[in-house]
Image (spheres, rainbow, N blue to C red):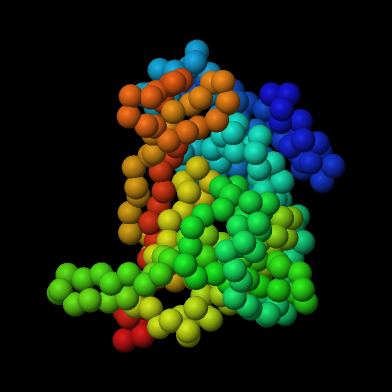
Amino acid sequence: MDNLQPLFHYLEENNITYTIDKHKDISPYSFISLESIKTKIHFINPSKAHKEWHTNYLLSSIDSSFSEQRIIHLWSDVWNNQQNAVLSRIAGLIGISKRIYGRTLEIKRIDIHTLNDFMEKNHISGSSSSKIKFGLFKGEKLMAVASFSGKRKINDREGLAHQSYELIRYCNLNYHTVVGGLSKILKHFIKEYSPDDIMTYTDSDWSMGESFTKLGFVNIGHTSPIVFNWNEELKKREKIKENTLIGFEVMNNGSNKYILNLNRINN
C-alpha cells in the first residue's frame, strides 16, 4: 500500500488514528479503519489474481457486513488521479476542513469552462456535461459549484406532464466545507426555474446520501452496479466496448436515486 502514503501522512499530521485491517472472508483488499468517525476505507487496487472476486462479489455485501459503519470503496484509479479531491472528502468526513457559510457568499452563473476547470480539480469524478451552472463566490474566489440538466418533461402516473431537472454535480473547493452551500443554490434554482421536481444520483462507492435527505430529497431506488473493463496496462477502469475486453471486468457499487418533489411539498 505504498501509494497510499500521502493518505497516511495526511491522517497522521492531523492526529487521526487509523489501522490497516484485513477481512479476507469478504475482500482480498485492505481496509483503512478510522474508528473516530466509524468509517472504513476499502482500497480496491484491482489485480488479475482476484479476477473471480470482482466477477462474483457485490460491494453492497461489504456494506451489509459493516452495517454500523460507513464504507468508502476507494478505487486505485480515483486515488491516483484525484488525490487532493479524495483527501478533501475525507477531511470533510473527519470534520477538519475549513468551514465557510453559504449565506456569506454570492451566487452567480458560470460558464462551462469555469465549471469543468473547478470540477477537474475538486471533484473525485472530474467534469461532466451540464446545461445550467452556478457558482458560489467569496469576492472573486470560487468556493463551490453546482451543475444541472436542462428541463425534462415527464408524465406522472396520472399522465400529467411535469417539469423535472437533474442536479448533476455539486462540490466545494478542496479542503473547504460550504455550510448551507447546496441549500442556497437549490433555493435560487427553484426560484428561477420553478421545477416540479429535482432528481439526483449519489455514488454508492462513497455516499450514504445523508446530505440530500437533510434537504428533503427522498431515496427512490438503487441503480445496478456498472461493469467496467480494468485496463491492467493503464491501471484504470474503462467503459466496456463490444468485443474489446482487454483486462478483466470489475463492478462499482451502483448509485442511489433521490428526488425532491416540489409539487407535493408546495401543495
Instruction: Specify whether 57 is left or right of 158.
Output: right
Instruction: Tell me which residue sits at (60%, 42%) in the image.
Output: 39
Q: Return the residue nearer the eye: 44 or 216.
A: 44
Q: Return the residue nearer the eye: 253 or 246.
A: 246
Question: Splitting the image into 4 quarters, where does residue 75 fall?
Answer: top right
Can residue 16 be seen by looking at this rendering? Answer: yes
Question: Splitting the image into 4 quarters, where does residue 22 fall?
Answer: top right
Residue 70 on image: x %, y %: 54, 45
Instruction: Tell me which residue sits at (33%, 24%) in the image.
Output: 243
- For the image shown, how many numbered marks are present on the structure? 0
Can residue 93 be seen by looking at this rendering? Answer: no
The outermost residue toward the top is 49
Instruction: Tell me which residue sits at (55%, 30%) in the image.
Output: 236
Instruction: Specify whether 82 is left or right of 228.
Output: right
The outermost residue toward the left is 158
Residue 41 on image: x %, y %: 60, 37
The outermost residue toward the right is 13
- Image quadrant in which the N terminus is located: top right
Residue 82 on image: x %, y %: 66, 43
Instruction: Tell me which residue sits at (41%, 70%) in the image.
Output: 150
Residue 144 on image: x %, y %: 65, 66
- Image quadrant in which the C terminus is located: bottom left
Question: Splitting the image into 4 quarters, where does residue 254 fall?
Answer: top left
